[in-house]
Amino acid sequence: MTVKEILTKLKSLGDDARHAHNKKAGAPDNQFGVKHGDIRAIAKKIKTDHELALKLWDTGNVEAQLLATLIIKPQSLSADEVDKLTRSTTFAYVAEWMNSYVVAQHPEKESLRVKWMKAKDRWAARAGWHLTASRVNKGANGLDLSALLDRIEKEMPKALPEVQWTMNNTLAAIGIHAPKFRKRAVAIGEKIGLYRDWPVSKGCTPPYVPIWVDFMVKRQGG
């Protein structure tokens, strides 16, 4: 499939409700409002096509970029190319897929994480905290959790919303997986109050750290 054919297909799958939802969540005008399941179905047919993925990304269209993250070859990208792609993101949902399906699979993700943890760019910083949360979830070997909590306590209240999300994920991960720092992580969550009133569907856990940590620890038998 060509870029033109894919964009035509994506446009035909556009859903008004999804478009409005995306817009409310901060999506740029260059979007069709396609449901994620429909994008995954297209990716399943294409499988892997690195060059096509890069061309789709360059369109700046939200759905085209989401599709690109599913069909690209992370190992074929240099660290500089991953950095460039990450910083050129324009929407949180795209950032989430980029971080999960491309950055997380790249062989130089740790060096990128270290670089991005110092970045002022919101999407690079978001990616850095995303990778840090992932490391905490997997054991946090080599990470200074006390220093991370210091940063979160100081920086999260004034951070951009895109960065707050993954900083909060890191805070929760520390509270869940590091008993030594659990009390402090929960206290920071209470003090900042981020996502305290976040609406959630019945049966779902809110991203408010004190509730999130308590639920996960109890579920794990802690």
Image (cartoon, rainbow, N blue to C red):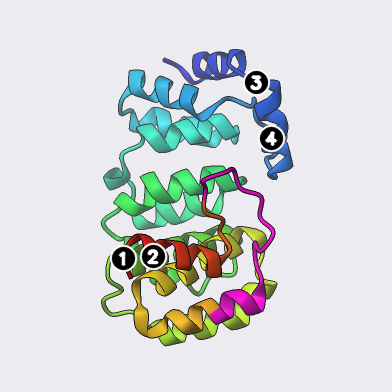
- Please name the amino acid that badge 4 sits on: His
Pointer 1: what residue?
221
Say if mark 2 contacts mark 1, CB within 8 Å. Answer: yes
29 sits left or right of 122 in the view: right
The circle drawn on residue 21 is 4
**Alpha carbons under labels 4 and 1: distance apart:** 37 Å
Q: Secondary structure at mark 1?
A: loop
Which residue type does callout 3 highlight?
Asp
Which residue in the structure is indicated by mark 3?
15
Q: Is residue 129 visible?
A: no
Badge 3 vs badge 2, beta-carbon distance below 8 Å: no
Which image quadrant for residue 73?
A: top left
Please tell me in which quadrant of the rendered image residue 222 appears.
bottom left
Q: How far is mark 2 from mark 1, CA to CA?
A: 5 Å
Q: Secondary structure at mark 3?
A: loop
Q: Which residues are magenta?
A: 187-204
Residue receiving disc 2: 218
Three-letter amino acid code of the residue under disc 2? Lys
Residue 62: quadrant of the picture? top right
Please name the amino acid that badge 1 sits on.
Gly
The picture places residue 19, in percent across and down from the top left corner, at 68, 29
Residues under numbered marks 2 and 4 in contact, where contact means CB atoms less than 8 Å apart? no
Residues at marks 2 and 4, CA–CA distance in whole angstroms: 33 Å
